[in-house]
């Protein structure tokens, strides 16, 4: 068996050389990144090296280089097996200090962003299973795999989509998460930017300034607003706005611990023909409270999540924790008070990239 080495400036270039020389039957034995030239390891040109061979039944597979590579590959496979065993035995309070440096770095970033220990372990285990032994030696390779893993876990994203019929959307959530401002941002986005006919309905008559706040927004944007006090009022308001492309309903903030308030919310929503219900959550809320909010608000069917106040926290892991646990799709994130600029459709790639930032 003849073993050959091939180098290129990229993996594609090196693989092209392998296939051109050895054909499609080539067997990849080893690959690594290296630097060529430079001074004392600095300023060298980044290269990719592939060691490959083809089966030759007439020769014995006993070349010194081949046996050395086989031994190295076996050691790497053992290392991966040990890593998986290490991860599988982690408890919720376990540490990751015995992992390879590349995985240790990723683990530190996940935990620093607020990813709960069990989910971090699941992610690391998934990365280890998807990577080949040589990728685990490269910090940048593991980071790239992490971005793809998080991006996949946050997908698919489900923003508000309008068709040829009127759509009714309600925003619900606890107090202080920014529902009214979020309603205004969505109204401005669809009315001013997408030229859609929008109407606003508010059932938030508990806060003295809530109606005035939304009234001010409605006048600035140029859309009608109706205030409702009872479930039957809401039904009638939706019927009156049947000619609109989009009807946005603002509800009063409810405490998930207050059974009477939650019953009132359920009664308000149950007879109204609402197409989609968005639960608005603050990214600054601690995980245990967020879980409690979602569990209690599930008495009203939740279709999608909106996360607000991303400009006030670095704990992006909260978003990943909640979407993983409840399997409810993300729609929008809000990262400021400006209307309508500070609301965006969730970009899983952008969020995943932020996990690698300090």
Image (tube, helix red, strand yellow):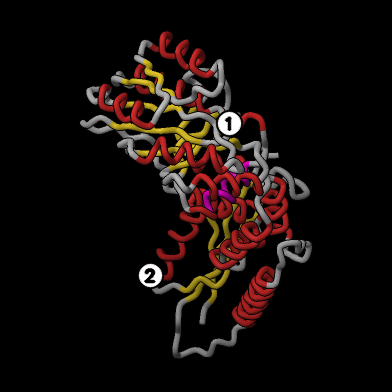
Q: Secondary structure at mark 2?
A: loop
Sequence-first tag of 2 and 1: 2
Of tags 2 and 1, the one toward the viewer is: 1
- Which residue carries the number 2 mark? 24
Residue 108: where, in percent of width, then height? Answer: 72, 52
Residue 346 visible at all:
no
Q: Can residue 115 be found in the magenta stretch?
A: no
Q: Is residue 309 found left or right of 179 in the rendered image? A: right
Residue 284: where, in percent of width, then height? Answer: 65, 36
Q: CA distance from mark 2 to mark 1?
A: 58 Å
Vertical order, 336 against 323 (above or below): above
Q: Quadrant of residue 250?
A: top left
- Which residue carries the number 1 mark? 177
Residue 292: where, in percent of width, then height? Answer: 60, 48
Residue at position x 73%, y 59% in the image: 101
- For the record, the magenta segment spans 316-324
Q: Can residue 323 be found in the magenta stretch?
A: yes
Q: Is residue 99 found left or right of 203 in the rendered image? A: right
């Amino acid at each position: 068996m003849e073993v050959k080495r091939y180098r290129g400036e990229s993996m594609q270039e090196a693989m092209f050389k392998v296939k051109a020389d050895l054909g499609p039957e080539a067997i990849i034995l080893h690959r690594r990144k290296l630097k060529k030239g430079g001074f004392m390891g600095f300023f060298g040109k980044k290269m990719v090296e592939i060691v490959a061979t083809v089966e030759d039944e007439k020769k014995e597979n006993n070349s010194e280089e081949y046996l050395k590579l086989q031994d190295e590959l076996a050691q790497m496979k053992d290392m991966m097996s040990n890593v998986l065993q290490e991860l599988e035995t982690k408890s919720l309070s376990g540490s990751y200090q015995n992992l390879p440096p590349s995985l240790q770095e990723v683990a530190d970033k996940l935990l620093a962003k607020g990813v709960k220990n069990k989910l971090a372990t699941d992610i690391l285990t998934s990365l280890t299973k998807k990577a080949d032994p040589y990728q685990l030696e490269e910090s940048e390779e593991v980071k790239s795999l992490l971005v793809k893993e998080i991006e996949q876990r946050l997908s698919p994203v489900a923003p508000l989509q309008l068709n040829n019929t009127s759509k009714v959307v309600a925003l619900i959530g606890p107090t202080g998460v920014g529902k009214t401002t979020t309603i205004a941002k969505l109204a401005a986005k669809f009315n001013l930017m997408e030229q859609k006919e929008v109407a606003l309905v508010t059932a938030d008559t508990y806060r003295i300034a809530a109606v005035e706040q939304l009234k001010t927004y409605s006048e600035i944007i140029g859309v009608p607003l109706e205030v409702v006090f009872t479930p039957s009022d809401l039904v009638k308001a939706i019927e009156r706005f049947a000619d609109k492309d989009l009807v946005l309903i603002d509800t009063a903030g409810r405490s998930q611990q207050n059974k009477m308030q939650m019953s009132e919310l359920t009664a308000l929503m149950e007879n109204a023909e609402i197409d989609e219900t968005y639960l608005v959550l603050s990214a600054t809320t601690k995980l245990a409270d967020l879980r409690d909010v979602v569990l209690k608000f599930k008495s009203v069917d939740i279709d999608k999540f909106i996360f607000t106040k991303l400009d006030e926290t670095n704990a992006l892991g909260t978003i990943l924790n909640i979407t993983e646990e409840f399997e409810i799709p993300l729609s929008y994130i809000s990262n400021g008070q400006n209307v309508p600029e500070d609301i965006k459709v969730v970009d899983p790639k952008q969020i995943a990239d932020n996990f690698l930032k300090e």
